[in-house]
Image (tube, grey):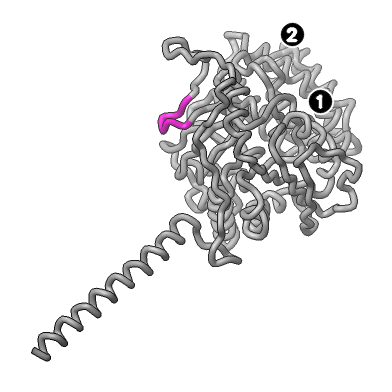
């Protein structure tokens, strides 16, 4: 009888131990999957958002008609059923009403380092007119020049600005390489407690139209304005397998631009942490991805599909002009850096339109010019009255595409200083000789 009692007691203790172990394991799994480890914190508590749309019954909106799609000229949903936001695909009144009741705070990071501080005022003034109007916005300005941050800016109700001091960088590539790390740290230190969503934006940009709650989602990325017409084999992914950002030729859906990305802090934290780790691995073996953090961003989004995509309306490039018929509204765009760049780009934009309309011009020539223009926009130094080398490169490319293109050389010859001016004159003379010879 005593042995049977001891047997049942032992069985009960073992069963209780198993239940206790199961409870502990379930708790640990929940923390690791839902919250994720942090470099500085064992547990990060994320602010949750209920995504169900609850609308005011008095709100009047247009009926959605299943057999009458609002846009038939562009793709509006991805193969993994993520929406692509274009003008005409959403009702602003409905979207705003759905999000207004949640009392959301949107964290917005922007890097104004070195000479890029001069773009900050225009960025903030245009953001106050068009960015997340009606929602609370907290700007986090990362800068090495806190004294140059505009102090007399008038922000709207529920909107505030904090300065995050960062070290001075010698190269713009270093800013790019450290950006993911700094955003990750900011999320861990503050943003995970203060905001429901986060957007990471470039400072040399300007808002022209609404960028509102229609852009909110768990993981949001913007389609690059220069590559949405091309097949993925022509995307400027990092292709070298030595880099952790490498994307094979047969993978990839869209090419995303790093000028704007965002989502829930938890998802953006996971993105920035992964990209930072990959950047550190590349640095340890002496490799720098083709487009720095943008290459790593694209690798991540190939593996982890965004839940919402912003069309090129949300990340346009002023250098492209406004002649793309599918772009009905430019909302957010990269600004042209200086007058030298603007004057040359106007000439080049006109020539590009002629080349695209001319059936005698091969597609490869137009494609080369477009690629060099992208390279120019990314690498253009911020100094006034200085035209970058890539301008000279595709000016020559343009000249070789026809006999009457020496005007490009003339446009270049009046800009620049010193050796740049001498080089421009050489381009001008070469183009004149080519024109005379062919004529």
Q: Which residues are magenta?
A: 77-82
Q: Is residue 302 found left or right of 403 in the rendered image?
A: left
Which is more toward the observer, 61 or 72? 61
Q: Check disc 2 and report the residue beneath it.
A: 439
| Distance between mark 1 and mark 2 Cα atoms | 30 Å
Which quadrant holds residue 193? bottom right
Q: How many marks?
A: 2
Element under disc 1: helix
Which is more toward the observer, 269 or 287? 269
Q: Is residue 262 found left or right of 351 in the rendered image?
A: left
Residue 216 pos. (x, y %): 58, 36
Q: In which quadrant will I find the N terminus? A: bottom left
Q: Quick one: which residue is furthest to the left in this view? A: 1
Residue 66 pos. (x, y %): 43, 14
Residue 177 seen = no
Element under disc 2: loop
Q: Main secondary structure of the magenta part?
A: loop
**Mark 2 burial class by Cα count in 10 Å: few <14, some 14-19, many 20+:** few
Q: Is residue 324 above or below residue 383?
A: above
**Which marked residue is nearer to the observer: mark 1 or mark 2?**
1
- Magenta stretch holds residue 282: no
Residue at position x 83%, y 44% in the image: 117
Residue 318 seen = yes
Q: In which quadrant will I find the C terminus? A: top right
Tag shown at residue 227: none
Q: Is residue 34 found left or right of 141 in the rendered image?
A: left
Which is more toward the observer, 343 or 416? 343
Q: Is residue 388 found left or right of 53 in the rendered image?
A: right
Q: Is residue 112 above or below residue 53?
A: below
Q: Check disc 1 and report the residue beneath it.
A: 342
Residue 353 pos. (x, y %): 67, 14
Which quadrant holds residue 124? top right
């Amino acid at each position: 009888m005593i042995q049977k009692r001891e047997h049942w007691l032992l069985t009960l203790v073992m069963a209780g131990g198993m239940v206790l172990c199961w409870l502990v394991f379930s708790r640990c799994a929940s923390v690791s999957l839902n919250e994720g480890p942090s470099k500085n914190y064992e547990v990060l508590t994320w602010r949750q958002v209920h995504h169900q749309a609850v609308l005011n019954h008095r709100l009047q909106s247009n009926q959605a008609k299943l057999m009458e799609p609002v846009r038939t000229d562009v793709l509006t949903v991805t193969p993994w059923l993520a929406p692509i936001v274009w003008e005409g695909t959403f009702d602003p009144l409905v979207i705003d009403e759905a999000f207004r009741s949640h009392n959301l705070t949107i964290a917005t990071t922007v890097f104004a380092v070195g000479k890029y501080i001069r773009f900050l005022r225009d960025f903030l003034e245009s953001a106050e007119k068009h960015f997340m109007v009606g929602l609370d916005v907290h700007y986090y300005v990362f800068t090495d020049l806190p004294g140059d941050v505009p102090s007399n800016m008038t922000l709207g109700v529920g909107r505030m600005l904090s300065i995050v001091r960062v070290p001075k960088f010698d190269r713009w590539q270093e800013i790019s390489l450290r950006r993911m790390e700094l955003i990750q740290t900011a999320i861990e230190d503050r943003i995970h407690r203060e905001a429901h969503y986060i957007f990471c934006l470039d400072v040399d940009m300007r808002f022209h139209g609404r960028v509102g709650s229609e852009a909110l989602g768990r993981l949001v990325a913007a389609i690059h304005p220069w590559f949405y017409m091309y097949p993925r084999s022509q995307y400027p992914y990092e292709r070298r397998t030595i880099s952790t950002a490498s994307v094979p030729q047969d993978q990839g859906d869209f090419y995303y631009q790093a000028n704007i990305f965002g989502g829930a802090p938890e998802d953006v934290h996971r993105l920035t942490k992964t990209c930072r780790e990959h950047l550190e691995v590349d640095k340890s073996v002496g490799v720098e991805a083709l487009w720095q953090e943008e290459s790593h961003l694209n690798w991540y989004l190939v593996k982890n599909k965004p839940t919402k995509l912003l069309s090129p309306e949300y990340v346009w490039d002023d250098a492209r002009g406004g002649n793309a018929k599918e772009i009905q509204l430019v909302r957010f765009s990269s600004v042209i850096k200086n007058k030298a760049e603007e004057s040359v780009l106007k000439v080049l934009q006109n020539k590009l339109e002629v080349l695209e309309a001319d059936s005698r011009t091969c597609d490869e020539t137009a494609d080369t010019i477009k690629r060099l223009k992208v390279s120019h926009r990314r690498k253009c130094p911020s100094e006034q009255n200085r035209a970058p080398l890539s301008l000279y490169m595709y000016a020559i490319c343009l000249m070789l595409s026809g006999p009457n293109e020496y005007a490009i050389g003339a446009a270049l010859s009046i800009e620049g200083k010193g050796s740049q001016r001498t080089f421009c004159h050489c381009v001008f003379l070469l183009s004149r000789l080519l024109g005379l010879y062919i004529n």
